[in-house]
Image (spheres, rainbow, N blue to C red):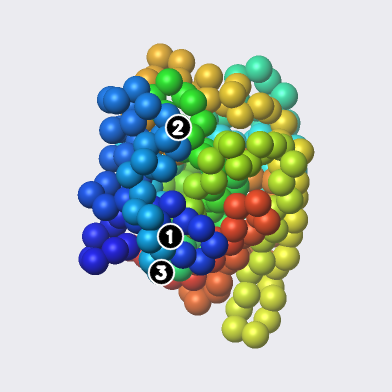
């Protein structure tokens, strides 16, 4: 955020080189129109000086999509939760076609420090820490960030057909703190991801995974997403969770959820009731 406007910027440590006149989505669209690489355009347009800028949601995506059951942990926990057909989720983990669902638009996204939502009709809402990618219109990965696919697990558990209601609602998706470009993050399958939930002074949950456990290649997920479905440039794809938060640690208003990956940064959000 710069002079009251959401502004793209190249972050360097705690400070940033602003790119006045553009949001990141506008810069992605401009780079596509000009046929120039996003990183080249950003380097060309970025101001030389460094400023302290408050990071906000790093992109206002036209579309956010999310993958499910891409980690064995997510599939087996969900199967254990459900009394539906045996191995319903494991099937998706192993089948050629991945699970991909629509998570929403910029309307449901919050950035670092923003409030993530707990639906009033849910008693078991949990964070799902995920690696997310920023896409060009041909499916090229333009950057990596952290995402929280906040989910009303009890609604999904009642019946898998309720998935859209468990996944899509106000403030159900946190993104940030910024995107790291593929030239800086060369191996997205070697990232240690952590998640901590704090309630006042107490830690109510701590979990860790590695993206080495992601059961599919990101290109495969993107390829399925784009089949008969050309998503606009600047859309975001969440790659699924490998950290599962049990019901005992269900989110309560005021809880602080912190997701971290050393090579990307930290995404922290406070939970709040919505609706
Ligand atoms: O199948 C339900 C959703 C799965 C999901 O969001 C995940 O595995 O991350
Ligand atoms: Mg998820």
Q: Observer-nearest residue: 81 or 259?
A: 259
* Location of residue 37 in the rendering, given as x and y in whole percent from the top left corner: 42, 29
The residue under label 3 is 52
Residue sitting at x 60%, y 78%: 199
Which type of secondary structure does the marked residue at label 1 adopt? Answer: strand
Q: Observer-nearest residue: 41 or 62?
A: 41
Residue sitting at x 60%, y 83%: 200
Ligand 2 within 8 Å, label 3 CB: no
- Circles 1 and 3: CB atoms closer than 8 Å: yes
Which type of secondary structure does the marked residue at label 3 adopt? Answer: loop
The residue under label 1 is 16
* Location of residue 4 in the rendering, given as x and y in whole percent from the top left corner: 23, 66
- Circles 2 and 1: CB atoms closer than 8 Å: no
* Location of residue 106 in the rendering, given as x and y in whole percent from the top left corner: 33, 47
* Alpha-carbon span between mark 1 and mark 3: 6 Å
Q: Which is more N-terminal, label 3 or label 2?
A: 3
Mark linked to residue 131: none
Which type of secondary structure does the marked residue at label 2 adopt? Answer: strand
């Amino acid at each position: 955020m710069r002079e009251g406007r959401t502004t793209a910027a190249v972050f360097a440590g705690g400070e940033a080189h602003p790119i006045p006149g553009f949001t990141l989505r506008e810069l992605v669209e401009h780079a596509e129109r000009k046929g120039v690489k996003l990183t080249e355009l950003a380097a060309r347009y970025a101001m030389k000086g460094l400023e302290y800028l408050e990071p906000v949601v790093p992109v206002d995506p036209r579309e956010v999509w999310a993958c499910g059951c891409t980690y064995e942990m997510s599939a087996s926990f969900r199967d254990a939760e459900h009394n539906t057909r045996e191995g319903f989720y494991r099937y998706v983990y192993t089948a050629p076609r991945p699970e991909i669902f629509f998570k929403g638009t910029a309307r449901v996204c919050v950035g670092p420090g923003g409030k993530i939502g707990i639906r009033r009709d849910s008693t078991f809402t949990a964070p799902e820490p995920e690696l997310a990618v920023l896409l060009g219109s041909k499916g090229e990965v333009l950057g990596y960030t952290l995402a929280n696919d906040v989910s009303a697990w009890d609604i999904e558990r009642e019946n898998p057909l309720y998935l859209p209601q468990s996944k899509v609602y106000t403030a159900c998706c946190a993104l940030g703190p910024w995107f790291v470009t593929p030239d800086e993050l060369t191996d997205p399958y070697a990232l240690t991801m952590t998640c901590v939930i704090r309630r006042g002074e107490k830690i109510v949950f701590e979990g860790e995974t590695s993206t080495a456990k992601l059961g599919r290649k990101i290109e495969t997920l993107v390829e399925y997403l784009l089949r008969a479905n050309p998503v606009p440039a600047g859309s975001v794809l969440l790659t699924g969770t490998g950290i599962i938060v049990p019901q005992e640690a269900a989110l309560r208003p005021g809880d602080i959820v912190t997701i971290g990956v050393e090579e990307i940064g930290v995404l922290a959000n406070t939970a709040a009731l919505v609706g």
